[in-house]
Amino acid sequence: MANRLRKDRPSRLKPPPRVDPLDGVGLVSKGDKSLLNHKAQEDYFNTITTRYHTFTGIPEVRDQDADGFAAIFASLSLNRAAASTTGPSISPRPITSNPDMSTMILAMRKLREAIVASSRRDEFVKTVYLFIIRTTILLGYPESYHPALLYLFRCIHPLLPLDEETVGEFVGYHILDLTCRQQDFASAFHVRSLYNYRCRKVDMVLTALVHGNWALFYQAKRNVKITVYERRLIEWADGGMIDHALQCLGKSYLSVNKGYVEQCTGTEWEKLKELKKVPWTCDGQTVTIRQARK
């Protein structure tokens, strides 16, 4: 009778905490060997992709055009400034305070380390790296996509050649990252020459930044053929180009039309005042840069 009562009584022990499958393994560089098995890598990658699509509510957006850019970033719950089509977000950075996003980014690193440590070379590896590069470009996380790009071209492509279209796509990302984020123009031209890469929209961005030509830069950004990935990479150069345009305007004019300032910087006047703390005054449609000497 006592045993029966003991069985019917609810347990006072707390249930064990649920372990996130993405957190259940560690980094290979820290001694964890859970992901060195090929089947474990495939299962872990499936978990990452499922979490990504569940979190964003969108499929991989390789072929989305620039018009869908704002909607995609609204879905990703990233920097809300990127959701505005009226002006750029300055130096995009990921919102790592979001636990789901931080977990996915760390999980991608764990998988990359496991693939490198296991010396795996097959179609699965190509799929993983293409996914990680595209995803972390959207998240504005160069700590992930930059080493992945280098490994893709130095270690994967020589043994498992990518098709011509994919090579063109990812060489373009590499050149834009070198140009817009790293400001390493010599390396950008080297990569362009190495792969005999020719793409008008990427060349326009490269030329604009080399010459400090903001008109050409914003013309390239308005190109309807720019993909969301390319636009995200180009955003790294927005801050520097705006600073350069403002410096040129400040040295050239006493006063100027507000619309011309917005055209030169690709940013609305109100947002420009907020982002760059521009000390100039605006009266109606006229922006006064400095007073004439008497």
Image (spheres, rainbow, N blue to C red):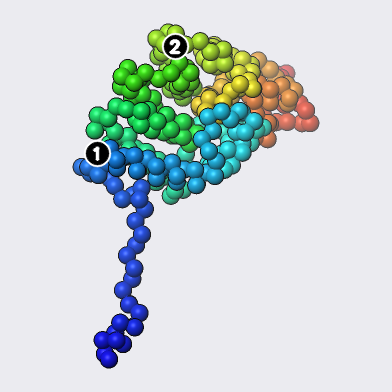
Q: Position of residue 240 (x, y in %)?
A: 53, 24
Label 2, label 1: how many angstroms apart (C-alpha)? 35 Å
Residue 251 seen in render: no
Local SS, label 1: loop
In the image, residue 115 sits, relative to residue 13, either above or below, namely above
The answer to whether residue 60 is left or right of residue 23 is right
Q: Where in the figure is residue 241, as x and y percent of width and height?
A: 56, 22
Q: Which residue corresponds to mark 2?
A: 192
Residue 36: mark in rendering: 1
Residue type, mark 1 in image: Leu
Q: Residue at x 32, y 77 (%)?
A: 11
From the viewer's side, name the closer residue of 161 and 83: 161
Q: What kind of residue is marked 2?
A: Arg
Q: Residue at x 46, y 31 (%)?
A: 134
Q: Quadrant where the C terminus lies? A: top right
* Quadrant of residue 19 within the rendered picture: bottom left
- Dot 2: within a 10 Å radius of its alpha carbon, few (fewer than 14), some, or many (20 or more) residues? some
Label 1: few (<14), some or many (≥20) within 10 Å? some
Q: Is residue 89 left or right of residue 36?
A: right
Q: Position of residue 122 (x, y in %)?
A: 32, 27
* Percent coordinates x, y for residue 26 in the rendering: 28, 45
| Mark in front: 2 vs 1 | 1
| Residue at the outermost bottom position | 1
Give the total of numbered labels: 2
Q: Which quarter of the rendering shows the N terminus? A: bottom left
